[in-house]
């Protein structure tokens, strides 16, 4: 039983690889990632030894995909390799291009054609049991049900950027492959994810609010923010992974082609900071100029992709539920303090 995870060097999928191997003693995992296996990954994957194979290659590299298929008996695939839309500086200060404006063809080629490459591989694998395609709340826009309520999977899909456009195109393509070739396929739309192994990588040049707040608190300095009432649906990476595992282990067909995976709550920045303060006493914040802020959130965005996501579909089908916010944040704080991944 071998699980292929694309984008498995990233923080969410590295958690999935470890959790899957810890759950299934007879399983193996092949990680395909365009980036190298860094020191943090080597330490993180150490407990599973040679049951994990790391392949550094692009999802567009059909030769690499064919070699993986030839060398391993792939029974499940989780496809998460992607190019995001965030612009940032690297830890060394070098400027990173914004894929949305500087390389839209790359975003579309990797995110869409990368999915096609994986689906082509999947339909030719005789022992494949299921295919999970990782999508994003970026397929939604800044508006949604009124008054702002949980964002359902059906309706409200109107991606404003190439990233979201590539994701909805990938969802539709995955659904069509399932129909044409009798494949067991589902897509998962993630809200804002944080958690263990979140660090700078070329594919993750963005620090989310929970990361910023927790690291400021651990460092003993106030969180510099522009407003207290911006909202986000923040989900712990391992809760995302437990949802995916629920789908990977589900017998029979999926009831739906798409599932939201999220906390299911719109948490204000003030609520986030106050919850961290319960875990790390002395946590504080201050309003600062935008150019000095650790966290910038637009307080006018209360719903749409920024608000709560409806997770009833996933819960009803698999029994999955995310941990309460405080419990999830406590776990992440413990990980940062003990493992030491900060950048």
Image: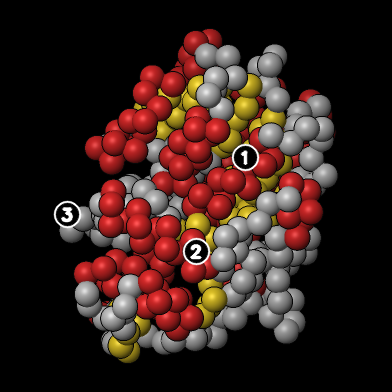
Identify the residue shown where x is 41% and y is 47%. 11
Q: Which mark is residue 65?
A: none
* Colour pattern of the rendering: secondary structure
Q: Secondary structure at mark 3?
A: loop
Residue at mark 1: 245
Task: Work out whether residue 82 or residue 213 is closer to the camera in this orientation and state it.
Answer: 213
Q: Secondary structure at mark 2?
A: helix
Task: Work out whether residue 265 or residue 168 is closer to the camera in this orientation and state it.
Answer: 265
Q: Quadrant of residue 220?
A: bottom left
Relative to 220, say whether 51 is above or below.
above
Q: Which mark is residue 327?
A: 2
Please tell me how crowded label 3 is: few (under 14), some (14-19), or many (20+) other residues with Cα within 10 Å: few
Lateral position of residue 44 relative to residue 139, left or right: left
Relative to 142, say whether 72 is above or below.
above
Identify the residue shown where x is 79% and y is 54%. 316
Residue at mark 3: 92
Q: Secondary structure at mark 1?
A: helix
Sequence-wise first label, 3 or 2 = 3
Asked if labels 1 and 3 touch by Cβ distance under 8 angstroms, the answer is: no
């Amino acid at each position: 039983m071998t699980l292929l995870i694309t984008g498995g060097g990233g923080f969410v999928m590295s958690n999935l690889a470890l959790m899957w191997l810890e759950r299934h003693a007879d399983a193996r995992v092949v990680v395909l990632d365009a980036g190298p296996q860094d020191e943090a990954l080597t330490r993180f994957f150490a407990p599973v030894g040679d049951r994990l194979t790391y392949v550094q290659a692009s999802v567009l590299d059909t030769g690499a995909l064919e070699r993986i298929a030839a060398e391993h008996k792939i029974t499940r695939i989780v496809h998460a390799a992607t190019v995001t839309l965030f612009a940032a500086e690297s830890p060394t200060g070098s400027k990173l291009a914004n894929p949305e404006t500087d390389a839209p063809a790359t975003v579309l080629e990797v995110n869409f054609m990368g999915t096609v490459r994986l689906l082509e591989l999947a339909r030719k694998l005789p022992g494949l049991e299921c295919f999970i395609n990782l999508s994003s709340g970026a397929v939604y826009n800044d508006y949604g049900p009124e008054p702002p309520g949980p964002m359902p999977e059906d309706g409200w899909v109107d991606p404003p950027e190439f990233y979201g456009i590539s994701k909805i195109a990938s969802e539709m393509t995955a659904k069509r492959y399932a129909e044409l070739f009798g494949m067991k396929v589902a897509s998962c739309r993630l809200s804002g994810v944080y958690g263990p192994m979140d660090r700078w990588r070329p594919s993750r040049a963005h620090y989310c609010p929970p990361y910023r707040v927790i690291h400021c608190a651990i460092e003993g300095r106030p969180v510099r923010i522009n407003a207290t009432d911006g909202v986000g649906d923040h989900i712990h990476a391992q809760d995302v992974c437990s949802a995916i595992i629920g789908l990977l282990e589900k017998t029979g067909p999926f009831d739906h082609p798409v599932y939201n995976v999220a906390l299911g709550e719109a948490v204000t920045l003030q609520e986030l900071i106050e919850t961290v303060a319960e875990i790390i006493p002395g946590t504080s914040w201050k309003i600062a100029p935008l150019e000095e802020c650790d966290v910038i959130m637009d307080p006018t965005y209360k719903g749409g992709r920024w608000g709560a996501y409806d997770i009833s579909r996933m819960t009803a089908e698999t029994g999955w539920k995310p941990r309460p916010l405080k419990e999830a944040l406590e776990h992440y704080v413990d990980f940062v303090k003990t493992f030491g991944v900060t950048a």
